[in-house]
Image (cartoon, rainbow, N blue to C red):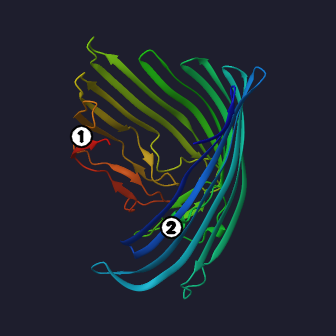
Amino acid sequence: MAELSSWDDNILAIELADIFYNNRHVKHPIFQWLDFTVDDYGGFVRAVDDRTFGSVRNRLIVGANIQAGTIDTEQFVNLPGAVKGALVASMADKSKNISFYAEDSLFVRPDLALIAGVQYLHATRDRRDRFLSNGDQSGKASYDLWSPRFGILWDATPDVQLFGNVSRSVEIPSYDANIFATPTSGLKAQHATTFEIGTRGRSGAIGWDLSLYRSEIENELQCLTTGPFSACSIVNAGKTVHQGFEAGIDAAVPLSDAGDTLAINAAYTYSDFFFDNDPRYGDNELPGVPRHYLRAEALYKHRSGFYAGPNIEWAPGHYFADNANSLTVDPYALLNLKAGYDPGKRWSIYVEGRNLTGKNYISTVAVAGTASPTAELFNPGIGRAVYVGVRVRW
């Protein structure tokens, strides 16, 4: 951070960070022999003005983000033995995302802030098809979008916050998602209006982070698998709703006067996602997401630095693998165990056992419009496994 000036309780600061460049070259013989190079680059600037007007504090944040990149792609027939065959696709994709944002927090009372913000996004997608024997798949798209936000933040006590906000968000089709699909020029940007209320804080040894939300989405970007050994195609799903509840709780229970404790952590999500009067799917559930998901851990911590305890991952109930709601995914529960020694120095050691019961389960789903029972949509979870490691801090 570079502080330009400060006086009394008024601070104007400019932060410069995260100028980045990333290059990766992927060679992947799957349904075809994929060979592509990705270059990503960008950065951001952020300024904060925090000052008091009389007895009223005001905090203004303004900034800009730039993210851009290219993907140079070639696809070949995948011959036996993972040998490159004839060229079947060649394209060069360019993308650019430039956003400017501002957020103002007006503290009408020392413990109560009214928040208003806005973001402007300019994005472009440009595809140049270099393999024309199957037609020219070149395409261009440009997006100029605004996203406002309004909220309230109340510090009910020094350790307890309550909040509520209404926000507009947008998502632009990405080339990573569309690299095997039709050009992005035919896709619309996804728009969402989200309503959220919640609380976070701590009381004694118990901490929490709870929120209730509802997002009303137009033109949701959905990646649908269309057949065996094929990558998904991005489509706009029309009107959908994502609503639910997220809860995180942690507690440190003292076990002795010497400092031994039992650390309890739990994170639960309830996801009620569905189509909203869709012409084809009606009010069906959106696929690919468990309605309930729980992660919980109980960890004994000895004052010497030794710790050990179990944790679970639990997705109860079936959820769907397709928009038509014709194929379901089975529930699962996993039992894990970890232990280690961390004396608070530069090193620590650990051992972790995962899926100790050897449960066969589906970890993720590649969703379809209408799936058959033999559809190749499911990715298996990792079986019984043990990991041992050493951490060193410099």
Marking on residue 39: 2
| Residue 363 shows up from this direction | yes
Choose between 207 and 367: the one closer to the eye.
Answer: 207
Quarter of the picture holding the C terminus? top left
For disc 1, the marked residue is 352
Choose between 347 and 222: the one closer to the eye.
Answer: 347
Q: Is residue 166 left or right of residue 221?
A: right
Dividing the picture into quadrants, the one containing residue 123 is: bottom right
Image location of residue 360, percent across then percent down = 27, 48
Q: Is residue 88 left or right of residue 182?
A: left
Q: Residues within 10 Å of mark 1 (few under 14, many from 20)?
A: some
Image location of residue 344, percent across then percent down = 28, 30
Dividing the picture into quadrants, the one containing residue 334 is: top left
Instruction: Say which element carries label 1.
Output: strand
Q: Is residue 257 above or below residue 284?
A: above
Instruction: Say which element carries label 2.
Output: strand
Marks 1 and 2 in Cβ contact (< 8 Å): no
Q: Residues within 10 Å of mark 2 (few under 14, many from 20)?
A: some
Dividing the picture into quadrants, the one containing residue 3 is: top right
At label 1, the amino acid type is Glu
Q: Earlier in the sequence, mark 1 or mark 2?
A: 2
Marking on residue 300: none
At label 2, the amino acid type is Asp
Choose between 82 and 52: the one closer to the eye.
Answer: 52
Q: How many marks?
A: 2
Image location of residue 202, percent across then percent down = 48, 20
Name which residue lies at 47% across and 62% down: 22
In the picture as drawn, the residue positioned furthest to the right comes out as 54
Label 1, label 2: how many angstroms apart (C-alpha)? 36 Å
Name which residue lies at 22% across and 34% down: 340
